[in-house]
Amino acid sequence: MLREQGKVSARLLQKIRDHVQKWYHNEGYACVPVVNFGNLNTKEVVCEVVEGDVTQLMVQFQDKLRNVCEGNTQLAVVR
């Protein structure tokens, strides 16, 4: 991508961000955002991502009006 363009533009950075995030998603990571690009005045583009682990999960059922209610789904299905 970068070799074809020759220079770094905002549009190219968006494409790189999308490509990196898609790769992580395909590898099974649901939410790994690109948060920063390194120094753009060099010959390489450094992309900073945030990887994390889910350490806690809280399940809450809501009705159509978004009020907390009793759910019919077994928690084992949700987790």
Image: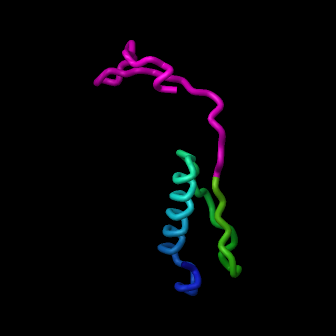
Closer to us: 11 or 73: 73
User: Where, quadrant-wise, is the N terminus in this rendering?
Assistant: bottom right
Residue 27 at x, y percent in the picture: 57, 52
Residue at (69% x, 72% y) in the render? 39
Residue extent of the magenta highlight: 50-79
Q: Which quadrant of the view contains residue 67?
A: top left
- Report how many numbered discs are placed on residues in the image: 0
Q: How is the image coloured?
A: rainbow
**Left or right relative to 28: residue 71:** left
Residue 78 at x, y percent in the picture: 47, 26
Residue 61 at x, y percent in the picture: 41, 20
Residue lying farthest to the top in this orientation: 70
Residue lying farthest to the left in this orientation: 64
**Left or right relative to 69: residue 48:** right
- Is residue 64 highlighted in magenta? yes
Residue at (39% x, 16% y) in the render? 71
Query: Height in image: 11 above or below 26?
Result: below
**Left or right relative to 25: residue 68:** left
Residue 36 at x, y percent in the picture: 63, 61
Determine the main secondary structure of the stretch shown in magenta: loop
Query: Height in image: 38 above or below 23?
Result: below
- Is residue 21 highlighted in magenta? no
Residue at (34% x, 24% y) in the render? 66
Query: Height in image: 20 above or below 39?
Result: above
Q: Which quadrant of the view contains residue 21?
A: bottom right
Query: Height in image: 23 above or below 58?
Result: below
Residue at (46% x, 24% y) in the render? 77
